[in-house]
């Protein structure tokens, strides 16, 4: 399973692809079970130059009946900084946020790997 | 305090207007991210995990009340109400919107600040001893020389595209409070045989993936030739630095591969053929700069009865003075540390309200002068002894009087994976866990000087290589692990830490630190710091304590 993410151009917020537009909450993101559809969405996202910066696909795992990013870095992006729980999306609370906070998956972040390659 | 002249003002205003136009064009899609990214980085604007981050340059860590109030205003209006002071004595704002960035730069320009050269392969913001102009152990005020370097290196066309970033630190005291051995160029003022002042020039220090302590390439450089000699060093680097490989592009790799002697020889040859008079500042200009750093001290008695009485009456105040108050060169004054290290909170973070308090105190009690230290604290350099009780009270009310300078809870931590796009692991929560364990003032005081430095990746913004205990976050198949090193120092007894053993999971790090502190308390001899005990015993007893369960 995959989701598509990037940072919104005008304010830098971490956002997720939902059927051609971008949403701030991970729980609202389109979940791809088909690799081709995911890649196709990524290509479309990359053409949205004025909306989002450097979109990329992330791997997911199941957590408390919901989906969560597999890599810890991506969960931090979807939640906010752990030192300021009142900042970022985590401040909104809810079951979806709790599911992200309780997820245990571990893998290298595709976002960071891509960043280092570009550097 | 430095001052902008007409050219500086016009340039910074022009640059801000130019950036406003560039941001507008980027938002409209007229330029791509690939075209825009180098432009925003030249203006200190990074894109991180949750938002843009603006890195504001604080020249050699020097602020006044107007500058700090402006930073408070920016933190309040454009960020989430706080900023993060870094080991480079800059301020990072972690929640900036691209569309607001030009307006923020306009605000900074109003108080003679900017974010130029806080990124990119340029000469970055110069740092200096934060005790400058206040400590009795300095030979001269290093800010005079740091300011000369700031003016010379800002927008220097020849050095706008170096092989890699370039950092210079200056101290004028025997005690190194500027980490000069781990800088691309470290400058330490010395007195020559004839009484003349000159710099010991260290080149090729640095942390990161391949840490080095900078070797001295010249024992004594007469101060008047500072700029021409810096030019020669950077010309040699510009010529031979490895632009082809980012991991080998820093000057430290060049110095190590050529050898300090050969590198020094090439610098001397380059320097000899240069027109020194064209670059070195005339005495009149140096005198003009020096005039900016002459605070009007009052003539005071060396002893303050009010101060002595407060110490005798209030143990908390007495404890704070033991750790956060230092001798001043001027009778009747003291240097006061402002701790940004409340156990359990984020090292280096300061709320806008705290910035306002510190700005008020600087204006009222410290000759309108306040400094940022590379240990991610602030300090008020010129406080009258008589005023210390009032300053302590105001700092304590604002949560800025934790009596822990250089103690185990005065931890350096980079933003790590909570914010930084390059990080492998979080640094802040590890610092919080350790500091919380040693939150008891008496316990921390009993342990004594112990410097813990934490980085969330190998780039080493948290200076972990030179921590008495260094902690490096690593990524093991996506999980946060931490490698511990022992015995590092970034001061005059500079040393790189020695690896303790296999990396530990996040929930074992604070416990490991506590175990090592117990070893130290058991093994230490009269007056030994943690570092001294480690140097005497070696790594073995510490390793045994931490990995006992594994055997």
Image (spheres, rainbow, N blue to C red):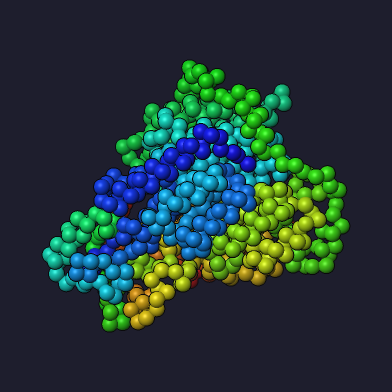
Q: Position of residue B253 (x, y in %)?
A: 42, 37
- Horizontal side of B534 relative to B38 (left or right) equals right
The residue nearer to you, when weighing B106 against B541, is: B106
x 36%, y 77%: residue:
A97
Residue B371, visible in the rendered structure = no
Total marks placed: 0
Q: Position of residue A69 (x, y in %)?
A: 29, 70
Q: Position of residue B214 (x, y in %)?
A: 52, 38
Q: Quadrant of residue A56?
A: bottom left
Q: Position of residue A51 (x, y in %)?
A: 27, 58
Q: Quadrant of residue B135?
A: top right
Residue B307, visible in the rendered structure = yes
x 68%, y 49%: residue:
B368
- Horizontal side of B64 relative to B303 (left or right) equals left
- Horizontal side of B337 relative to B213 (left or right) equals right
Q: Quadrant of the N terminus of chain B?
A: top right
x 53%, y 69%: residue:
B433
Q: Residue furthest left?
A: A36
x 66%, y 57%: residue:
B360
Can you say whether B273 is above or below B258 in the image?
Answer: above
């Amino acid at each position: 399973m995959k989701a598509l993410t990037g940072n919104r151009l005008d304010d830098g917020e971490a956002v997720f692809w939902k059927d051609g537009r971008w949403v701030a909450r991970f729980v609202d993101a389109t979940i791809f079970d088909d690799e081709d559809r995911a890649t196709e969405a990524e290509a479309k996202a990359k053409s949205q130059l004025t909306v989002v910066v450097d979109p990329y696909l992330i791997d997911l795992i199941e957590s408390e009946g919901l989906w969560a990013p597999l890599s810890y870095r991506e969960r931090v992006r979807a939640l906010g900084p752990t030192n300021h729980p009142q900042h970022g999306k985590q401040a909104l609370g809810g079951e979806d946020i709790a599911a992200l906070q309780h997820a245990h998956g571990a893998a290298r972040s595709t976002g960071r790997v891509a960043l280092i390659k570009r550097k | 305090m430095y001052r902008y002249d007409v050219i500086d003002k016009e340039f910074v205003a022009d640059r801000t207007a130019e950036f406003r136009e560039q941001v507008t064009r980027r938002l409209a899609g007229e330029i791509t991210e690939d075209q825009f990214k180098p432009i925003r980085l030249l203006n200190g604007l990074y894109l991180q995990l949750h938002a843009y981050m603006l890195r504001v340059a604080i020249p050699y860590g020097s602020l006044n009340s107007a500058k700090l109030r402006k930073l408070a205003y920016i933190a309040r209006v454009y960020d989430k109400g706080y900023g993060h002071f870094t080991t480079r004595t800059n301020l990072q704002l972690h929640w900036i919107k691209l569309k607001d960035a030009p307006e923020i730069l306009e605000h900074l320009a109003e108080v003679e600040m900017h974010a130029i050269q806080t990124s990119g392969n340029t000469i970055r913001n110069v740092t200096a001893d934060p005790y400058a102009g206040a400590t009795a152990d300095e030979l001269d005020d290093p800010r005079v020389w740091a300011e000369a370097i700031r003016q010379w290196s800002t927008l220097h066309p020849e050095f706008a595209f170096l092989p890699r970033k370039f950092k210079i630190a200056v101290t004028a005291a025997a005690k190194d409070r500027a980490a000069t051995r781990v800088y691309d160029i470290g400058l330490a003022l010395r007195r020559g045989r004839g009484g003349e002042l000159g710099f010991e020039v260290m080149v090729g220090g640095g942390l990161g993936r391949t840490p080095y302590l900078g070797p001295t390439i010249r024992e004594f450089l007469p101060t008047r030739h500072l700029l021409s000699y810096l030019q020669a060093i950077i010309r040699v680097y510009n010529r031979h630095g490895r632009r082809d490989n980012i991991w080998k592009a820093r000057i430290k790799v060049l110095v190590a591969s050529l050898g300090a002697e050969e590198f020094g020889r090439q610098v001397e040859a380059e320097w000899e053929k240069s027109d020194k008079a064209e670059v070195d500042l005339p005495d009149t200009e140096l005198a003009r700069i020096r005039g900016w750093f002459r605070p009007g001290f009052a003539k005071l008695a060396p002893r303050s009865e009010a101060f002595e009485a407060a110490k005798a009456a209030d143990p908390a105040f007495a404890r704070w003075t033991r750790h956060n108050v230092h001798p001043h060169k001027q009778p009747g004054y003291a240097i006061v540390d402002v701790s940004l290290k409340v156990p359990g909170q984020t090292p280096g973070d300061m709320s806008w309200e705290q910035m306002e308090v510190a700005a008020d105190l600087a204006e009222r009690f410290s000759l309108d002068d306040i400094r940022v230290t590379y240990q991610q604290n602030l300090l008020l350099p010129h406080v009258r002894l008589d005023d210390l009780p009032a300053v302590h009270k105001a700092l304590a009310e604002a949560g800025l009087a934790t009596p822990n300078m250089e103690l185990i809870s005065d931890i350096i931590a980079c933003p790590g994976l909570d914010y930084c796009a390059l990080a492998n692991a979080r640094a802040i929560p590890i610092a919080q866990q350790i500091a919380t364990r040693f939150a008891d003032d008496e316990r921390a005081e009993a342990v004594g000087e112990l410097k813990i430095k934490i980085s969330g990746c190998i780039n080493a913004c948290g200076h972990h290589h030179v921590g008495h205990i260094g902690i490096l976050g690593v990524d093991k198949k996506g999980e946060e692990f931490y490698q511990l090193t022992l015995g590092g120092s970034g001061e005059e007894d500079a040393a790189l830490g020695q690896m303790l053993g296999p990396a530990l999971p996040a929930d074992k790090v604070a416990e490991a630190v506590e175990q090592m502190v117990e070893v130290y308390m058991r093994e230490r001899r009269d007056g030994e710091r943690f570092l001294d005990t480690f140097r005497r015993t070696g790594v073995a007893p510490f390793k045994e304590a931490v990995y006992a369960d594994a055997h």
